[in-house]
Image: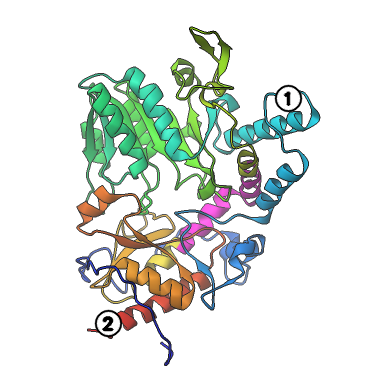
């Protein structure tokens, strides 16, 4: 800390989490585990982070007098110039409503909007673009499945299996639908590696199971679930599987045909696209049998005074004027990501993930949640953690105000998981492909300074 710096401390109460520095999740001196390095990160070459950073204008600024270090990518990603240009181009040159006009602007907007749908389908390897429904976000996509498929198919005594590590968006809609239908929610706990216990999940699946709702990658634990296996187990008893892929689609190759999942959701804003748009993938036969989620324009075939008939999917589920520019922007983001290559992104982020974990373990009295990296266990490029006797929001506030480092603090929309871990909240640093080792190093230096500052009051 520099002498003479005046620090304004937060006014909220200090709720110290219980942290054990001897936790198995953080042993100092462990050997580095890493996936094979991609060409972009081999010694002597320019890393993917360095080569892509010029594409993101927002990263090149000072925050509170320091160069911005953005490590809140699990909450939302930054947008490359190509996406910003696509949005500007739409609003400046062909802004119009879709599917409704015969004039040039409307026809072009419709073509670009539907092209974006095809890009999403190709990106996740859906068999047809009609299996892609645009929604406001992944939360609305899950609600669509809950209120359309759920209310039509769930009966009293039917079981829905989830894990305690699910995002609130994957829990709350099913709580509401279960209350209406009489279905029962069952939750899988964590195993000794702090990963949702897949063997417990497998044992829960029975003839009563109608749906399994699971994340692909945890937004808190950084763990990756074996979706292919879970789908096989569920399908063996006739159950469906809904995958929350918000933390996987932006960071790795996701093949819905390979996974064989029945439903999958993701959000544009986490994959370098605009806010306000996401998508639902649903198998064609399921979407065809599902009733509308919202009523209004565009989702109809014919409207009479006493009844209406409905359009085929995906139009059936896209009532009203959609987020046209945002969907087009998502298409531009997919072009950008595809131009880099998702496998290349994944390989680079795995190296960063291990580097982040290793460096965090050098911080005294830290507790990192989720599995320890090994030859068999890979973490996503994020770490949720606590430092003994320092509230995570204090850490995040000081990092921002004194160092320009942006991380997350709170329960990350995963309160049941945090209760299971015995804490009210955690801090979270999350990376994307435009981050670098230097970002991690600056974060660790800043975190060390922050911890020293708070420990000086003891």
* Residue depth check, mark 1 versus mark 2: number of the one nearer the observer: 1
- Magenta residues? 331-352
Asked if the magenta segment contains residue 316, the reply would be no
Q: Is residue 159 visible?
A: no
Give the quarter of the image for residue 449: bottom left
Residue 277's label in the rendered image is: none
Neighbourhood count class around disc 2 (C-alpha, 10 Å): few under 14, some 14–19, many 20 upward = few
Name the colour scheme: rainbow
Would you name the residue on which mark 2 appears? 455
Chief secondary structure of the magenta span? helix
Image point (56%, 56%), residue name: 78
The quarter of the rendered structure image containing the C terminus is bottom left
Locate residue 60 relative to residue 265 in the image: left or right.
right
Report, in whole angstroms, how far the alpha carbon at label 1 lies from the one at label 2: 65 Å
Image point (37%, 30%), residue name: 241
Asked if the magenta segment contains residue 342, the reply would be yes
Neighbourhood count class around disc 1 (C-alpha, 10 Å): few under 14, some 14–19, many 20 upward = few
Would you name the residue on which mark 1 appears? 101
Badge 2 marks a residue whose secondary structure is helix
Question: Is 131 or 298 nearer to us in this picture?
Answer: 298
Give the quarter of the image for residue 112: top right
């Amino acid at each position: 800390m520099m002498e003479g710096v005046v620090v304004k401390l937060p006014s909220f109460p200090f709720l110290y989490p219980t942290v054990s520095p001897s936790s198995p999740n953080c042993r100092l001196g462990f050997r580095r585990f890493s996936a094979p390095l991609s060409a972009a990160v081999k010694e002597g070459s320019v890393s993917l982070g360095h080569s892509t950073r010029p594409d993101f204008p927002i990263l090149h600024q000072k925050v509170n007098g320091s160069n911005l270090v953005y490590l809140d990518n699990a909450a939302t990603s930054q947008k490359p110039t190509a996406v910003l240009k696509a949005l500007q181009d739409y609003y400046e040159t062909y802004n119009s409503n879709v599917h409704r006009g015969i004039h040039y602007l409307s026809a072009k907007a419709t073509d670009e909007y539907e092209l974006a749908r095809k890009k999403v389908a190709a990106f996740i390897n859906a068999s047809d673009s009609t299996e892609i429904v645009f929604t406001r976000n992944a939360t609305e996509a899950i609600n669509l499945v809950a209120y359309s498929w759920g209310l039509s198919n769930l009966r009293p005594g039917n079981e829905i299996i989830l894990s305690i590590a699910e995002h609130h968006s994957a829990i709350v809609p099913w709580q509401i639908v279960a209350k209406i239908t009489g279905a029962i929610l069952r939750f899988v706990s964590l195993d000794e590696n702090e990963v949702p216990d897949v063997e417990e999940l497998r044992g829960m699946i029975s003839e009563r199971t109608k749906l399994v709702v699971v994340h692909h990658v945890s937004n808190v634990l950084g763990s990756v679930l074996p979706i292919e296996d879970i789908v096989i187990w569920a399908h063996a008893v006739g159950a469906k599987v809904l995958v929350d892929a918000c933390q996987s689609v932006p960071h790795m190759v996701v093949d819905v045909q390979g996974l064989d999942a029945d439903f999958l959701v993701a959000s544009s804003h986490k994959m370098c696209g605009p806010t306000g748009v996401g998508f639902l993938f649903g198998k064609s036969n399921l979407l065809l049998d599902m009733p509308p989620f919202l009523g209004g324009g565009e989702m109809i075939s014919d409207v009479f005074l006493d009844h209406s008939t409905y359009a085929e999917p995906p139009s059936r589920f896209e009532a009203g004027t959609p987020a046209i520019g945002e969907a087009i922007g998502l298409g531009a983001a997919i072009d950008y990501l595809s131009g880099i290559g998702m496998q290349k992104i994944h390989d680079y982020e795995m190296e960063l993930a291990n580097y982040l974990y290793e460096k965090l373990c050098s911080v005294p009295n830290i507790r990192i949640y989720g599995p320890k990296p090994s030859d068999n266990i890979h973490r996503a490029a994020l770490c949720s953690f606590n430092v003994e006797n320092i509230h995570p929001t204090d850490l995040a506030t000081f990092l921002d105000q004194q160092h320009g480092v942006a991380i997350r603090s709170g329960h990350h929309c995963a309160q049941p998981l945090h209760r299971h871990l015995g804490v009210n909240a955690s801090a979270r640093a999350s990376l994307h492909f435009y981050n670098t080792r230097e970002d991690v190093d600056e974060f660790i230096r800043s975190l060390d300074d922050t911890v020293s500052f708070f420990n000086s009051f003891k």
